[in-house]
Image: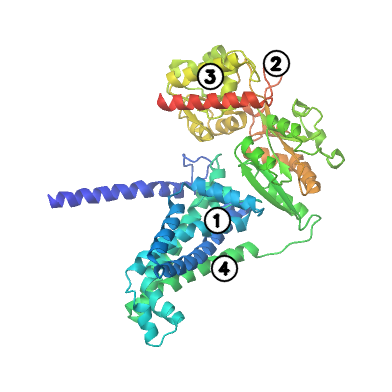
Amino acid sequence: MKKSKRSFGKVLMALMIVFFYLPIAYMIVFSFNDGKSLTKFTGFSLRWYQHMLESGDMMEALYTTFGVALIATLVSTVVGTISAIGLSRSKKLVRQLVEQVNNLPMMNPEIVTAIGLMLLFITFRIEKGFMTMLLAHIAFCIPYVMLSVMPKIRSLDPNLADAAMDLGATPWKALVKVVVPQITPGIVSGALIAFTMSVDDFIISYFVTGRGVKNLSIMVYTMSKRVNPSINAISTLVVVIITIVLLLINIVPVIAAKREKSETTGKRRILPAAAAAFAVLIVAVSVARFGGGGVEKPYAGQTLHIYNWGEYTGENILRDFEEKTGATVVMENFDSNEQMYIKVANGESYDILVPSDYMIQRLIEEDLLQKLDHSRLDCMDLLSDAVRGLPYDPQNEYSVPYFWGTVGIVYDKTKVDLADLEEQGYNIFLNEKYKGDIYLYDSERDSFMMALKALGYSMNTENEQEINAAYDWLLQCVQTMEPEIVTDEIIDNMAQGRKALGLIYSGDATYVIAENENMGYYLPESGTNLWSDAMVIPKNAKNPELAHEFINFATEYDGAYDNSSYVGYTSANQEVMDVLYGTGGDYEGIDSYIPRAGNEMDEVFVYNEDTKQIISNLWSRVKIAASNA
């Protein structure tokens, strides 16, 4: 019986190890994938490591992550250890009170701590960036250090320090030579927990950072919104770095102990070994970050702050612009127009924003944008006629189009009959032939557009009866069709043919079709959302002159080509559109790349706060119904 229990325990342990480490192994393998897919291995290549090393954004995030983690670990370990020692000498009531206060941050949901710290920095008008992130990390790491050190202190003889001082030691020597060596394992444990918590943190970092400063967690979150295998490469690099640090911390003391044949000496060398490992990492980071020089350029020393969608720029455009101008580009990313609006409306300063059509309308109405100086722009004639003079900015006084496209249906030609699409349009999402084989896009705006168009209504309707009819349509879909509601994971999933059809943006469909020739893109005759994202300059921009330079650079052929060929969305530059869609182009013959023109049922979204709130509430109810179906 005992033998069978031991065997069962070993099997369970093996399964747990597989459960924890198989995803990491999977990630490492796909970091060497030659293709762009995150699920299909097409051959060995180092291209994504090269892309990672050439990406200033990724390397900056790497430096920030380990710079913040190392400093926060050092400071929180010192402060936490001293606090724990001091607390052990305090009165019982004070000790119990402080311990409860110390436990509160660890028990609090991270989002509460994050918002509290964000409000603190806003209240005291502290500009968010590297320093605010560092202070926040120190604050949430200290309780973990104290929690690790306190049990070791409790296990000590309370008279140990007094005995050392009676024998002639000063208070400092009693602390350093007697107390600290006895609690070293607790200090090391606290330091390792602090380091891990700092490297791993996303939520608090996301709320307390600003001015383009981001750690790897924020970077990976941004990259995961679209297909980018560099996410595997940079994650693998982090695993390697942390593994090396842990090996140094654990192996060096053992070697030292054997060499000196002294267990005590070995223990005392744990902290120096950890410090040495951290120091090596700091030196490596500093050399990589600050080495090298450059030639003086016209905008040398200036900084351009851009707020753009995640993974919405080409591989080289930012680096090329910096090379041309000598300026530094700091790019922050948002994942919704509403997230962007909150920051801008609260006074955060950026030089360029890239919002969508309806949000540009709102920003203009609320006087948050400045008019463009067209005397500084030589790119307007390069734009496609179809994307100029759109309803939200008829004279292009405030905006220069960046990408544009449609929202339609991506479908597997081997599973979906084109005749069904032509006959049913969006109502194919109610055809039970495809039950359990469809994706809905987790966007209230686009999902209600689909439902309203399926019913023959305008997607800009303000009629509550029509909106409720669209809600009923979506409710029927989620209750009878068993759809999977997703965001950008639809891209890779449809490229692998995992479902029959789904709602998708045209630029994402372009990538899907380029990866899988069995995929197609269909726009129902009942109409679609003809959307556009454009570059605008906020009213409080600090460097509008450099912003105009970037708008020209991103709209001219080289910049626009780099953007569009890499991201897959349709360029506003007519020549780039023709080249990429034409013979030999990256998207030759892929119809989703060229937005439809001439359909009177196609519309541009108009901003309406009241309608938006109604639709937002109804979409939440649709998702609840989907989870209960």
Q: Secondary structure at mark 1?
A: helix
Q: Residue visible at 48% across and 61% down?
A: 142
Pick whichever of labels 4 and 3 is earlier in the sequence: 4
Amino acid at dot 4: Val
Q: Secondary structure at mark 2?
A: loop
Indicate which disc residue 136 carries: 1
Distance from label 4 to label 3 (Cα)? 58 Å
**Residue 345, image x, y percentages:** 69, 40
For label 3, the residue is: 471
Q: Is residue 421 visible?
A: no
Amino acid at dot 3: Tyr
The answer to whether mark 3 and mark 2 are in CB contact below 8 A is no
Indicate which disc residue 293 carries: none
Distance from label 1 to label 2 (Cα)? 53 Å
Q: Secondary structure at mark 3?
A: helix
Distance from label 3 to label 2 (Cα)? 24 Å
The answer to whether mark 1 and mark 4 are in CB contact below 8 A is no
Indicate which disc residue 600 carries: 2
Front: mark 1 or 2: 1
Q: Is residue 567 left or right of residue 472?
A: right
Residue 405 image-quadrant placement = top right
For label 4, the residue is: 283
Front-most of 12 and 28? 12
